[in-house]
Image (tube, helix red, strand yellow):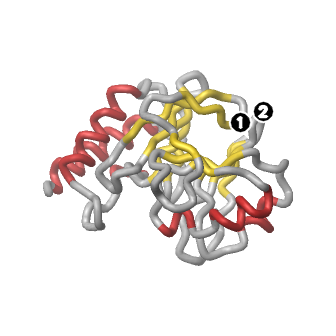
Amino acid sequence: MIDNLAKDVQAFTSNVFYVGGERPVVVDPGANFDVVQRLESHPDPEAVILTHTHPDHVGNLEDVKAAYDVDAWGFDPEQEGVDHAIADEERVQMGDHEYLALHTPGHIPDHLCLYAEGPGVLFAGDLVFQNGGFGRTDLPGADHATLIDSIERLLSVLDEDLREMHVGHGPSVTNDPYHHVELAARSAKMAGG
């Protein structure tokens, strides 16, 4: 079960995904709303998994860590709030499935995508979005050419039968999400640097 806890929030936040099952986790706790109150109707999370550390994705991190006495996992433990590193190509248990962590910089140096091949589920963070959207590269640490390389890497790993793509902003994609990643690769190349 994957639930976007921020789906009707009007504040500036990322999507916040609760992944239920054997190891319940929160993927990106978001910012500027009471995520702990929204978690109360779910079994307690055992960890927070971060796609990256931009403020709109981690503003609520300390609240979740304090409320549930959990640690946060992300690519770069040098970043504030990140307790444990997830290495490139490490496998991470989220809910009932094991996800492959892919280091996908370009939007920000510590960006991760998380992909479970069996159920066909991708957490894409801010790398790619619905309808060929892709992450901004006008922020500190961002690089457009690196972002294109990261999208190409993601395409090389994903199965074309991908069933769900959960993104950092906007709606999740359940209608041919692989095609949306392909569109993002084309759009990013056309946009240039």
Please give the name of the residue rendered at 28% of the width and 60% of the height, measured from the top-left corner.
141
Q: Which residue is mark 2?
A: 22
Total count of labels: 2
How far across and down, in percent of the image, does residue 111 sit?
A: 41, 49
The answer to whether the residue labelled 1 contacts the one labelled 2, judged by CB atoms less than 8 Å apart, is yes
How far apart are the two marked residues, 1 and 2, measured between alpha carbons? 5 Å
* Left or right of residue 162, residue 17 in this image: right
Name which residue type carries label 1. Gly
The residue drawn where x is 53% and y is 24% is 117
* Marked residue nearer the N-terminal end (1 or 2): 2
Q: Which residue is mark 1?
A: 95
Q: Nearer the viewer, residue 42 or 25?
A: 25
Give residue 156's position: percent from left, percent from top. 33, 27
What kind of element bears circle 1? Answer: loop
Residue count near mark 2 (Cα–Cα under 10 Å), binned few <14, some 14–19, many ≥20: few
Q: Quadrant of residue 4?
A: bottom right
* Above-or-below relation of 143 to 94: below
Decide: is 7 above or below 77.
below
Residue lying at 52% horizontally and 62% vertically, measured from the top left: 80
Residue 143 at x, y percent in the picture = 22, 55
Amino acid residing under circle 2: Glu
Residue 25 at x, y = what percent?
70, 45
Q: Left or right: where does residue 63 sit relative to residue 28?
A: right
- Taking 86 as reference, is 80 above or below it? below
In the foreground, 169 or 89: 89
**Callout 1 crowding tier (Cα within 10 Å): few <14, some 14–19, many ≥20:** many
**Image height of 14 relative to 110, above or below:** below
Task: Tell me which residue sits at (79%, 62%) in the image.
Answer: 67
